[in-house]
Amino acid sequence: MPLVRIDIRKGKDADYRDAIGRAVYNALVSVGVPENDRFQVVGEHTDENFLFDPDYLGIHRSDDLVMIQITWNEGRTVEQKKSLFKTIVDGLAAKPGIRPEDVLINLVDVKKENWSFGNGVAQYAP
């Protein structure tokens, strides 16, 4: 059910992009997202279209910043969300070697009835 949008600067190879997607997917599964529920979009952006503050909140970001937005069903606890953030960052540090300071994650909680996985049907609607 999660829809993951991953945004990076243009120029990284396919293995790098795949490693990011796999780390995010594995982290989602670790907090209870079903296996095989993988829907991800990776967007690559030129320097002039990838804007961020390199020092917001005292966190020193490099040009290797990765922005991850996850839209998923509401209902998870703050502890589950914190665990997800940590697991994503640890996975990205392991492979492809992204610094924790260079990972920005945003969660968007939605109601289950706001999804259609095909055929114009709201599969999770009551």
Image (spheres, helix red, strand yellow):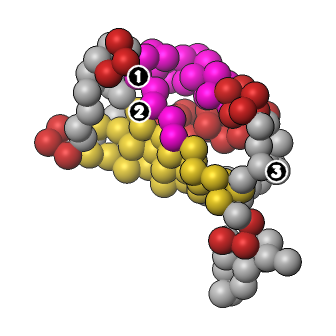
**In the image, which disc is placed on residue 102?**
1
Q: Is any part of residue 14 visible from this angle? A: no
Q: Are marks 2 and 1 in contact (CB under 8 Å)?
A: yes
Q: Amino acid at mark 2?
A: Val
- Confirm whether the magenta stretch covers residue 94: yes
How many residues crowd mark 2 within 10 Å: few (<14), some (14–19), many (20+)?
Answer: many
How many residues crowd mark 1 within 10 Å: few (<14), some (14–19), many (20+)?
Answer: many
Q: How many marks?
A: 3
Q: Main secondary structure of the magenta part?
A: helix
Q: Earlier in the sequence, mark 2 or mark 3?
A: 3
Task: Please indicate whether residue 12 sits to the left or right of residue 42 in the image.
Answer: left
Q: Residue at x 20, y 46 (%)?
A: 49
- Residue 118's x, y, as percent? 67, 80
Q: Amino acid at mark 1?
A: Asp
120 w.r.t. 51: above or below: below
How many residues crowd mark 3 within 10 Å: few (<14), some (14–19), many (20+)?
Answer: few
- The residue wearing badge 3 is 34
Q: Residue at x 65, y 60 (%)?
A: 110
Alpha-carbon span between mark 3 and mark 1 = 27 Å
Q: Amino acid at mark 3?
A: Pro
- Residue 106's x, y, as percent? 51, 40
- Confirm whether the magenta stretch covers residue 90: yes
Task: Report which quarter residue 55 is drawn in.
Answer: top left
Q: Residue at x 44, y 49 (%)?
A: 42
Give the secondary structure at mark 2.
strand
Residue numbers of the magenta segment? 84-106
- The residue wearing badge 2 is 66
